[in-house]
Image: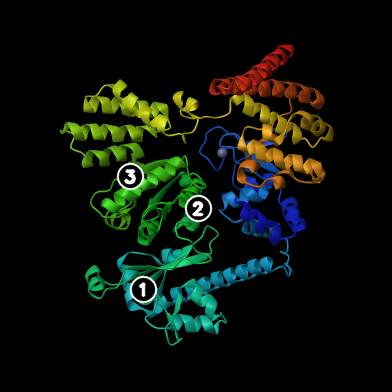
Amino acid sequence: MTIGLWVVKMAFYPESFIEEVKSSNDVVDVISGYVNLKRHGTTYFGNCPFHKEKTASFAVTPDKQIFHCFGCGVGGNVISFIMKAENLSFKEAVDFLADRAKLAIPVVNNDDEGLNDIKIKEYHKSQMYNINKEAGKFFFLNINKSVIAQNYIKQRHLNIDTVKRFGIGFALDDNSLWKHLKSKGFKEDDMLATGLVGKNEKGYLFDKFRNRLMFPIFDVRGRVVAFGGRALGTHEELKEKHIPKYVNSPENLIYTKGRHLYGLNIAKQQTQEKLKRILVVEGYMDVVSPHSFGVTNVVASLGTALTENQGKLLRQYTEEVVLSYDNDQAGQNAILRGIDVLQSLGIMCKVLQMEGAKDPDEYVLKYGKDKFNNLINNSITAVEYKIKILKQRYNLEDTADKIRFLNKMAEILSKVPNNIERDIYIEKLSKELGVGKEALVAEIEKFLFKDDKKEKSFSIKATEELKPTISKETSELEETILYLLASKRKEVYDEVKKFVLVQDFQDVTNKSLATALYDAYEDGSIFNIDLTSLCKNEEQVNLVTKLMLKPNTSDDYSKITDEVLSSFKIQKMQRRKLELFSLMKQTNDEQTLNKYQSELRELIQNMARK
Ligand SMILES: [Zn+2]
């Protein structure tokens, strides 16, 4: 969440309403709808819906009304949970929960100009959703009026249920849509904004989609955000008449390319068991055809490569993604990019291998459901796919090419997060290529060293040393100080602030949270707020929820405070000692050197006394 959103949140609804929404939606109750939770003491645990895991490290507490995942570190309150789980903005999540609790959403009366802008924007957005919904119905009913549309549907073996479920329709070659929309009372500006209607130089409106099969694109909540229109006719006919095969709605207030997945609103309705794996394909018909054959865990990325937003969306619903794009150069590149996106999000990823058809649409029509399911089951791993592509691109008989191949290979293997899996590939490749295992490992380590973004899960020690970061002891100590401050005890704060300055915090997130907490103690607001509302970004929320869920080791706060502060003082002195050593090395000036030396002596004496 960005700071900008935070500001909008504050401005949009009165804080009292947000509190009402929170208190009417119990966090355990809401999350139970998404995660199978089991109670242990005062806390509920389940498998985290935001990262793939087998151990239940996702904790929810009814008393504090927060959740926190000790696996991936994500945390928050009931609103942030819904934002993530349903991929909604703050306002949308509040609306969603208000709706769930049957609360009336307040009409915001405020003359502030910024607020009005937001209100106006929200109003136009809702009008655009309404227009798209109405247009979708209109297109659907048009199928009865068009013989070519009916023929196409018949030829593709689409049953009426499938057509209905996806809301497939037809745009006639006339201006009937905008006339219909006008008769429903929609405003010209809103119609134009959806991109369904255009305006010529003379100021006349016209329908932009003509003679096309229409596929509404839904968001996960089932609202129509855009349309894709497929021209009917053979490839040659279209080429001759310079008609593009596909035309899509433009990006606008309610539609951003790469944020939605075609068919996900339908796929997500299945049981969790079936959704363990989702097939991602290129086009509308690659989703619709398998569905009509009963293969329903298929979605399309609409555009060639999978975006990070789409990857995050998938992560909410599935553990494994199988990619299936065309087998040309563009398709291969899209798969390679997709693999990177999915792996960076921690999603298991495989690639469909298809022969005898150019896409899933054609394949399922030709060979049927069972063979198609077999194909999905026999998908190859991302690494196997990359090796396969690389082998095609390099001539392994040629020594120079072989070295380049090995180098590329090492880069790929350096990104395999699982050591056992990586070892298997190293073993296999070294045999296959007649290269020593040690040589391959050495190559891989070069990439691991380069990549400072690697997660700690990489067990190769070198990556840890690469991070010029704060030691584990320091960050644990800082977290304990924040934990003490989060207890909302004035006497603890008074003691802590005597010795610990905000600037003393080494970790950026710790420092920013400390700043917020110190401020809240100073103005007294700490005692009547929910700590998550202090936070200015997602990192802070994740940290606060972690602190709030930290088990109490003791109730003796003054004792813990004393212990922590004495460790803090020692650490601070040690840091200064190292700093002095390095300063002394750098200076040539006798006087400065003496000054440093005397400070060092004093410091060492102090440390000895502790
Ligand atoms: Zn998690």
Amino acid type of the residue tagged 3 in the rendering: Asn
Res. 403 in view: yes
Amino acid type of the residue tagged 2 in the rendering: Lys
Indicate which label's residue lies in the foreground, 2 or 1.
1
Is residue 107 found left or right of 232 in the rendered image?
A: right
Amino acid type of the residue tagged 1 in the rendering: Arg
Residue 212 badge: 1
Residue 358 badge: none
Tell me the colour scheme of the image: rainbow
Look at the numbered disc 2 and give the secondary structure of its residue.
loop
Is residue 88 found left or right of 330 in the rendered image?
A: right
Q: Position of residue 535 (x, y in %)?
A: 68, 45
Look at the numbered disc 1 and give the secondary structure of its residue.
strand
Q: Is mark 1 within 8 Å of ligand 1?
A: no
Front-lying residue, 570 or 49: 570
Disc 2: which residue: 268
Residue 374 badge: 3
